[in-house]
Image (cartoon, grey):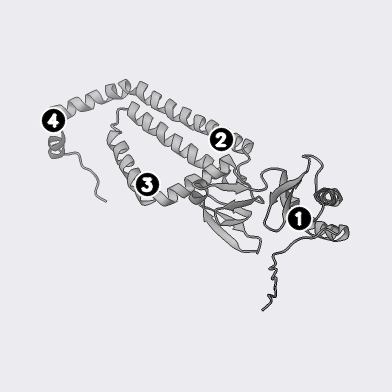
């Protein structure tokens, strides 16, 4: 490796003449001395930036724990925040030292815009993943429905969420699709209402049918006394009277309650002699005298 040689030619090339170089050498200690406040200020800014970024990282961790954000993403988000803040403090320190960082900031901004345009879809999914983890519209184990897909939340990642359907199919949904559409969380609340409909014949006693349904609700092991069950005539159909039974249960007992009530009411209707009508066609044949 060739070492830089200080010769009259190199001095003349960089400083014009020997006198200019001598002046620069003689002024160098003074320039360094005069720059001590800026150097100290830059060092202080960097030190403060290091400690302040650590503090902000700890605060972010506390916020995520309070929001019950998945612990697997704590370190990642904290590192992103700390690194970003330290870069800002370093640039600030360089500006204090007299460096022109405008061109660097412009280049960095241009690179960010270019990357953002190229990775727009991924960035949108990533931002949606952060939104889901902070706002918690659902958690792992919740039963949700999104448009035509529903199932139990199995895993929540930055880019997508995995559902397990009732028939054991795994569905992977992009997070940006989740945050931009209406979502139903069936297990967000501890209790849930089961809307039941039972049809009886127009010839049957409505009061008796309501009593049978009320006794069936009381006998079902999954129903709750509070909120109170509502049993009322819901509609007059073409061939039947519809009785609505609005029954409350725990969210995880929704389907056991639904199936138990369907079977229990049918058996109790049979015992009480209440008919459940079905569609039928009556044909009347009349004879005319010739």
* Mark sitting earlier along the chain (3/2): 2
CB atoms at circles 2 and 4 under 8 Å apart?
no
Residue pointed to by mark 1: 202
Give the residue at x 39% y 51%. Answer: 119
Residue pointed to by mark 2: 60
Give the residue at x 25% y 46%. Answer: 3
In which quadrant of the rendered view does residue 290 lie?
bottom right
* Mark sitting earlier along the chain (1/3): 3
Give the residue at x 70% y 68%. Answer: 282
x and y percentages locating residue 122 in the rendered image: 44, 51
Residue pointed to by mark 3: 116
Tell which tag, 2 or 1, sits nearer the viewer.
1
The alpha-carbon separation of the residues under discs 3 and 2 comes to 25 Å
Residue pointed to by mark 4: 18
* Mark sitting earlier along the chain (2/4): 4
Element carrying mark 1: loop
Tell which tag, 3 or 2, sits nearer the viewer.
3
x and y percentages locating residue 264 in the rendered image: 82, 57
The alpha-carbon separation of the residues under discs 2 and 4 comes to 58 Å
Say which of 129 and 49 sits in front: 129
Say which of 191 and 49 sits in front: 191
* Mark sitting earlier along the chain (2/1): 2
In the current view of this chain or complex, which residue is farthest to the front? Answer: 290
């Amino acid at each position: 490796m060739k070492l830089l040689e200080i010769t009259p030619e190199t001095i003349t090339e960089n400083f014009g003449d020997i006198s200019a170089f001598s002046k620069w050498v003689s002024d160098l200690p003074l320039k360094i001395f005069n720059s001590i406040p800026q150097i100290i200020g830059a060092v202080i800014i960097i030190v403060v930036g290091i400690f302040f970024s650590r503090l902000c990282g700890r605060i972010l961790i506390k916020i995520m724990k309070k929001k019950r954000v998945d612990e697997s993403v704590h370190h990642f988000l904290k590192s992103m925040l700390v690194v970003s803040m330290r870069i800002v403090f370093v640039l600030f320190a360089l500006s204090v030292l007299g460096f022109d960082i405008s061109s660097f900031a412009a280049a960095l901004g241009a690179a960010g815009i270019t990357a953002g345009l190229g990775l727009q879809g991924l960035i949108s999914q990533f931002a949606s993943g952060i939104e889901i983890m902070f706002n918690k519209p659902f958690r792992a184990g919740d039963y949700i429905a999104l448009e035509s897909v529903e199932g139990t939340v199995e895993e929540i990642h930055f880019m997508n969420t995995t559902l397990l359907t009732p028939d054991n199919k795994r569905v992977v949904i992009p997070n940006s699709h989740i945050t931009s559409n209406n979502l139903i969380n069936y297990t967000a609340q501890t209790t849930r209402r089961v809307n039941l409909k039972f049809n009886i014949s127009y010839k049957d006693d409505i009061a008796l049918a309501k009593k049978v349904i009320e006794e069936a609700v009381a006998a079902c092991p999954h129903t709750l006394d509070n909120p109170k069950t509502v049993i009322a005539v819901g509609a007059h159909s073409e061939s039947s009277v519809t009785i609505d039974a609005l029954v409350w249960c725990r969210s995880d007992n929704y389907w056991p309650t639904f199936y138990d009530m369907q079977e229990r009411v049918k058996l109790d209707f049979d015992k009480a002699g209440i008919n459940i009508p079905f569609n039928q066609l009556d044909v009347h044949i009349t004879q005319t005298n010739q």
